[in-house]
Image: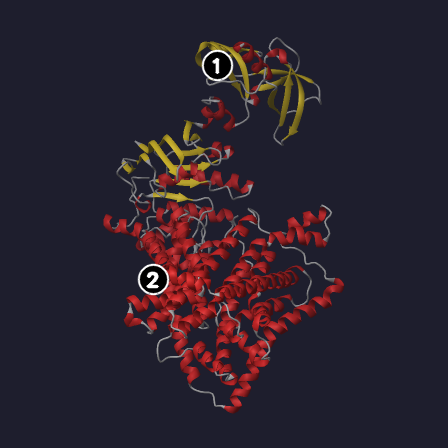
Amino acid sequence: MSGLSISKLHATHGHTAVLRDLELTVANGALACVLGPSGCGKSTLLRVIAGFHHPVSGTVTVGDRVINDDRTHIPAERRRIGYVPQDGALFPHLTVAANIGFGLPRAERRERVAEMLDLVGLNGLGDRHPHQLSGGQQQRVALARALAPRPELLLLDEPFAALDAALRTELRTEVAATLRRAGATAILVTHDVDEALAFADVIAVMRDGQIVQADAPHTLYHQPADVGVARTLGETNLLPAELADDHAITAFGNLPLTADVPTGDGVVLLRPHQLRLAAASGPHTVEAQVVACAFRGHDYRIELATDTRHDLPERLITYADTAPPEAGTVHLQAHGPAHPIPDAEPAAPAHARLTAQTATA
Amino acid sequence: MSTLRPLVRPSLPPVLRWRAGRALPLVAGLVALVVACPLVFIGLQAGRSGWDSAGRLLERPLVGTLLWHTVSLTAAVTAAALVLGFTAAYLVERTDLPGRRAWTVALAMPLAVPEFVHGYCWVSLIPSVQGYWGAVLVMTSSLYPLVFLPVAATLRHSDAAAEEVARSLGHGRLATLWRVTLPQTRPALAGGALLVSLYLLGEYGAFAMLRFTTFATAIYTEYETAFDTESASILTLVLVALALLVVSLDARAARRGRVVREGTTARPCAPQPLGRWKAPAVAGLAGVVGTTLGVPVYALVYWTMRGNSSTLPSTSILSATAATLGYALGAAAIATAAAVPVALYAWRRATRLARAVERAVYLTRALPGIAVALAVVFFAIRYAQPVYQQPPLLVAGYAMLFFPLALTAVRASLAHVPHGVEDAARSLGVRPLAVLARVTLPLILPGLGAAFAMVALTASTELTATLLLRPTGTETLATQFWIYTTDLAWGAAAPYAAVMTALSIPAVVLLTRRTLGTPRPSKGMR
């Protein structure tokens, strides 16, 4: 049984199309994340699911209840879908307990509120008002309030965006744990990759009003559907390669592929940590110059320029545990499987553009 | 979790739900329609007179004189108010002037003295204050706080960073003031200038007192003395056109000077040391306060004492106060209740329709009081004869006239309602009407109170519409005051003026506090 399923969803703001033919399925009990840049329509998607925005067409189903199709629009208050907006939107005139109990029948309020305060670790703060709480505490109250009426689905709209970095990391781990404990199906919307990777079982990458790819974080990171998804998830090295069934022939020698592909020219993806500095020159190493190096605490981020003769992009990026020799020549090695990117123009490599031109000429 | 028992309430039958969802735009539209209808009635009335007589009237030299009087006075007073208002605001908000809080109150207080009372105070003390220059003096004294307050608010809340950057780029104090500070306050200056001009266009009492004819006094004379409703309505139409012209000029100025600042909260500026200019600055402000506040207070005290020595305080002041408050409170209740749906509609939906509804309502703010009053009179004479010169008509007139005040106050309080609380409440399974009762209305309760108080207090000192709409047989504070001053009974009029001024003080305090704001406790997030 599916927690949430959306098909052929179209939505507009005035005359501007915001969601176009959107498809999304989230399994029951899963924590899903919709990841995309600002303005891609992810907040609108959430508001459609919550019932605040009327879509033009499409079907939205929660469990086996159709909450939106061409004939039905169940109002927000009857959807049993919880909603945590970006700034929490606590009711400023009510205490924490009254906030959490807002959606509960009077008779069950006391017991359930105590239970929820316990769940989010705010015991003893029930009599406070929202302005007496810290930002993180406010978000916990907002979460408790949304979970209190036992919604079938919980929606979180960038709930950690307004918090500072350390608190954000702490709170999102905690919220994910709370949601798993409560057995909730939840959808989190964010533009923060780290947040998506840390929080979700499933990440749906959204672009221009469509879901481009929805997969487990690991799959999405290593096997993106296209260049855009690859870049959304992190830094990329896109190398021209000769593809032959299960391996690719590149400047770094033969690399195994993540999936079988038809033979021919193509582009493969190597993530920065798949490139490593080698001790010495070897048969499958590539010589490169260090252009820039930044120490990031847990590692070094190194930008390298290779010589044009290898057909490589202008810049390669690698993460290394140790500092490279200053402004010197290094030798690069590639590790692990490369992922073929089907739609494939190589990423702004001077040499590749040149070959493309000669090909057309 | 869907296996657990859901804790939600039973819901309404579908028919009722549908209505609740659609009712708001309907009610809001209806209110806007009612509030905007004076314009229509003036048009209708003027149309009845036909083009010929309209043409004849408009070609009379009178109209040229009126236009010249009105426009030249508006230009002079607005300019004077801008200079005075900006200078005072800069001194109070940005320099190390001693006693800045007290100055702020003293500089805003002239608003508590109604314009026609200002006129009375000067004329009764110095009979030679009259005509154009008298009008410039009196109207500038009574209206410059309308510039002072918004400019002071902008200066108080604007970020120091822009000025500091200007200084770091090598601009001196004066250059920074001219090229950075002044442009930052341009929207406030434009808004203040708009208010001043609109007040001037609509003012009747003060000009009648100062024997200076403008459109408003001419309209009143045509209607009350000559019983010429057609000329009155044609002149009103010209006046309304002038007002709309002013509004459109202001809209252009405000668009050009939009100040964009987002994100972080403003850091206040360090006050500029005045140095050797301190004494002249204090003397200048003392002169301003003495002229604009000292003279009226002196006149009111003087005439009240004199009046009391000759005649006994009459009981009629009590009955006039009671009648005034009765009408004013009724109007305040209606205006506030009507403002809620319009404000809610515009706040919830940023659709073009919602904005249009709200803008239409604000446009009525430009309608001079005399125009609204005449429209109500025409309407009553033609369609509602039984209520003509009855209390309901006066209450309705007040409610229409001061509706924008109520709307502004309700909108201001809605702006502080955190975004998304209504959505959050609905997602918890609460019906829209219950959301209104449990979340939205409790949150804007202070705003509703402010709206109610503003309308009630402003209405209780209104003169022009009251003269035209007053029920037969009752006198309000303003009309009784007017009767005495027309007979030059300065002493007898003084207590009425004093009571009206006293009633206005809370409104001015409220307005000052709302405009300048008090530092809010930070909300933790954002």
> Which percent across, then down, holds residue A61?
30, 35
Above or below, B249 relative to A279: below
Mark 2 — residue?
B48
Q: Are marks 2 and 1 in contact (CB under 8 Å)?
A: no
Q: Nearer the viewer, residue B251 or B316?
A: B251
Which amino acid, by three-letter code, is at mark 1? Leu
Q: Residues within 10 Å of mark 2 (few under 14, many from 20)?
A: few
> Which percent across, then down, holds residue B155?
61, 57
Residue A93: quadrant of the picture: bottom left
Residue found at x 59% / y 54%: B186
Q: Quick check: can you spot residue B214?
A: yes
Residue B389: quadrant of the picture: bottom left
Question: Is the same chain shared between marks 2 and 1?
Answer: no
Residue B145: quadrant of the picture: bottom right
Which residue ends up furthest to the right in the rendered image? Answer: B276
Q: Quick check: can you spot residue A98?
A: no
Residue B271 left/right relative to A217: right
- Give me the C-alpha separation between circle 2 and circle 1: 88 Å
Q: Nearer the viewer, residue B349 or B323?
A: B323
Which amino acid, by three-letter code, is at mark 2? Arg
Quadrant into which the N terminus of chain B falls: top left
Above or below, B189 relative to B171: below
> Which percent across, then down, holds residue B334?
36, 65
SS under mark 1 = strand
Q: Nearer the viewer, residue A101 or A188?
A: A188
Q: In the rendered structure, the residue with mark 2 lies on which chain?
A: B
Above or below, B26 relative to B63: above
